[in-house]
Amino acid sequence: MQILDAALPVFVRYGFRKTTMADIARAAGISRASLYLSFSSKEDVFRAGSARAHRQTMVEVEVALKGQGSVFDRIEAAVTTFQRGLIVPLGASADARELFEINMALAADITLETRQRFLDLLSLALREAADKGDINLDTVDTEPADLAGIILAAMSGIKEMRGAEPDLGDNTRLFMRLLRAAVTPHTIAG
Amino acid sequence: MQILDAALPVFVRYGFRKTTMADIARAAGISRASLYLSFSSKEDVFRAGSARAHRQTMVEVEVALKGQGSVFDRIEAAVTTFQRGLIVPLGASADARELFEINMALAADITLETRQRFLDLLSLALREAADKGDINLDTVDTEPADLAGIILAAMSGIKEMRGAEPDLGDNTRLFMRLLRAAVTPHTIAG
DNA sequence: AGACAATTAGACACATTAAGTCCATATGTC
DNA sequence: GACATATGGACTTAATGTGTCTAATTGTCT
């Protein structure tokens, strides 16, 4: 939907409150009257926009997880894709907090569903890798689902760490190296 | 004035219309009531902010013009300083057009005065260089003031050229090379 | 041409928000 | 305790935004 593609940058730029239906219509190149033919309210536009962004990003995430390379490479690619699609755009806004809260107020279901689906996909990838012996979860004595949960939790924490020197990508890559070192099959020396 | 330092980024971010006195007060870390003790209206804040930015930038421009290097180096430094102080910040805003128009509506005098002063400073630098023989204006058969005018005109035109590939800095440097080549003392071969 | 659907400008009633003013009350500072 | 400065909050008025509706416009199809 071209309207949503036009609307999201407007929300990111001005925040939810300062964005008007006139702003969105102008950005989409249509009249305000037409905008109301497609969406019943500003909330409606936002919800649909959020849903679209989540859907779209998850498609890309699945592609990344089915791509080439080791489990680590694929998970890192998936995580990066997820961040690029849903975290970075909001983080770039000065109204990041407002947008996050509005999103939770208007599209919590979509957001939580997406998070769960991402969790499931990561779990699956880890389980398959464990079954094939590519990684060894015994070292950390855990289940794939729990490890996937930790990955998401770390991402979430890293996301909140705005202001510190290293950026999102650096922290994410560092965490991935940790993960890689921890579950790569190996024996304790000695 | 710390209030103006806080206010300008807010105007740049939201544009004039969407910026409220509450936004400015919050950014400045004071109450709305206090803000009205210093400024009588939003227009007043903007005018004062524009004046401050212009004054401040011109001080830096004068420093650049009195610095080290050839006339070209100093003029290029001055032009870059001018752009960094007054052009780039506005250009970074999605509401650049609105801000420019508001500025002309509320602070045209300051803006035009500054432009004139910049013109005078450039003229003076060029005249001194011509007198010392560092540059030769006979080649282009012109007066320092006219040449300074062309420099400003080119800057103005380059500024408007948003969207094209090369950025502000690249175009500015290219123009400076042109200028340098044109008035550096030389004889026609042959 | 004339029927058709899609889009629009514009006006509208209503609700919300911002501007600008005011004051009683803090919060220091001398 | 007097003085200056800053503040939350209330208030009026003006401006702006929302959501709805209609008559007019536009382009398309036949």
Image: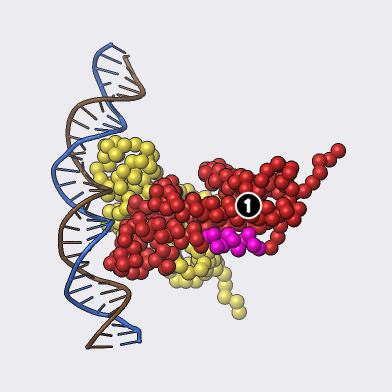
Chain colours: A yellow, B red, C blue, D brown
- Is residue B172 among the parts visible in the rendering? yes
**Residue at 62% in and 48% down:** B145
Depth check: give the residue in front, A187 or C26. C26
Q: Quadrant of the C terminus of chain A?
A: bottom right
Report whether C26 appears left or right of D5.
left
**Residue at 52% in and 67% down:** A166
Label 1 sits on residue: B123
Residue A188 spot, x, y in % from top left: 57, 75
**Residue at 46% in and 67% down:** A163
Q: Quadrant of the N terminus of chain A?
A: top left
Residue A118 spot, x, y in % from top left: 40, 56
Which residues are drawn in magenta?
Answer: B57-67
Magenta span: chief secondary structure: helix
Whether residue B62 is in magenta: the answer is: yes
Q: Amino acid at mark 1?
A: Ser
Near mark 1 (Cα within 10 A), the count class, few <14, some 14-19 or many ≥20, is: some
Depth check: give the residue in front, A17 or A61. A17
Label 1 sits on a secondary structure element that is helix
Q: Chain of mark 1?
A: B
Report whether B121 appears left or right of C21.
right
**Residue at 37% in and 67% down:** B28
Residue A97 spot, x, y in % from top left: 35, 61
The answer to whether B5 is drawn above or below residue A78 in the figure is below
Residue A35 spot, x, y in % from top left: 29, 39
The answer to whether B80 is drawn above or below residue A37 in the figure is below
Depth check: give the residue in front, A122 or A93. A93
